[in-house]
Amino acid sequence: MIECMNATKIYQNGVAGVKDVSLSIREGEFLYLLGSSGSGKSTLINLLSCQETLSKGKAIVCGYDLSKLKKKDFYKVRREIGVVYQNYKLLPNKTIYENIAFILESTDTPLDEIDSKIRRALTMVEIAHKADYYPHELSGGEQQRAAIARAFINNPRVLIADEPTGNLDPRTSMEIFRLLHRINKSGTTVILATHDQKVIMNFQYRILTLDKGQLISDQEQKERGSLQYDFRKKAYYIV
Ligand SMILES: Nc1ncnc2c1ncn2[C@@H]1O[C@H](COP(=O)(O)OP(=O)(O)OP(=O)(O)O)[C@@H](O)[C@H]1O
């Protein structure tokens, strides 16, 4: 589904956002992208979702070779990849419903399908009753659910979440993690970037760790159990 071979991004100021990253992500995987601030998580996400272009190396995403893809065809990759951001990026002057409709209208979805698609997506993220609210009228967790519904509305093959719980309390964060896992169970590949190394989820997962733009480890965990949050230790753990 995603293959990177020495993928490198050098910004105009000479800083390497990511350097010689090689990895392979299979369809349906749930994986964490860990790394401290500045380690290159957002750069890698922006490369994979065609928000940035490669400086060197190769990346193949959903069958598209990004090193050869023309700018006019970037939308083909973007429709396969939904991205969720820490600060939600919802349009403030549109209701939640309109925020999602905006995406569907720009992809030529037939008008008679728009309403049912939006209702289904909002039901999936459990905020159907807030469809006509504006973003500022929602809690952080609800706004993130709306952002997930928006990213998911075109059934992308990959959902990438860049620090989706950075602004949320632990309990709400856990609800968002559970939601992402539900989405993964339905077959979507999920990549969750975070610098919170204490986050541990309750089923099979893989952790890629970046440091100074380089991939320094790639581990797979097969542990299963149920997820608990320890408020004293401020950590998630499996029981
Ligand atoms: N547009 C840019 N121009 C120049 N340098 C950049 C740009 N964006 C990121 N960088 C640099 O690239 C490196 C990786 O940044 P990146 O934002 O990918 O890290 P990150 O792991 O996502 O960090 P955080 O967790 O703080 O969001 C950093 O040194 C950063 O300063």
Image (tube, rainbow, N blue to C red):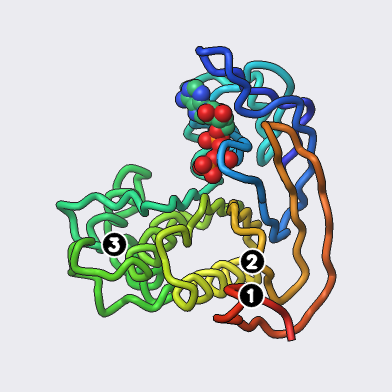
Separation (CA) of disc 3 from disc 1: 43 Å
Above or below, 133 against 79 in this view is: below
- Which residue corresponds to mark 1? 236
Task: Determine the CA span between mark 2 and mark 1.
Answer: 6 Å
Q: Name the amino acid type tagged 2.
A: Val
Does 51 sit left or right of 146 as displayed? right
The foreground one among 114 and 69 is 69
Relative height, residue 235 to residue 91 (above, below)? below
Q: In which quarter of the image is the C terminus?
A: bottom right
Mark 2 or 3: the one toward you: 2
Q: Which residue is drawn at 24% across and 74% down?
A: 130
Question: Circles 2 and 3: CB distance less than 8 Å?
Answer: no
Q: Which residue was labeled with disc 2?
A: 199
Q: Badge 1 local density, few (<14 within 10 Å), some, or many (20+)?
A: some
Residues tagged 2 and 1 counted as in contact (Cβ below 8 A): yes
The earlier-in-sequence mark between 3 and 1 is: 3
Residue furthest front as drawn: 232
Whether residue 74 can be seen here: no
Which numbered disc, 2 or 1, marks the residue that appears first in the sequence?
2
- Say which mark, if any, is on residue 112: 3
SS for callout 1: strand
**Which residue is found at the position 53% from the left and 74% from the top?**
174
Number of residues whose C-alpha sits closer than 10 Å to that of mark 2, classed few (under 14), some (14–19) or many (20 or more): some
- Residue type at numbered disc 1: Tyr
Image vertical order of residue 216 relative to residue 98, above or below = above
Looking at the picture, how far across and down is residue 129, in whole percent? 26, 79
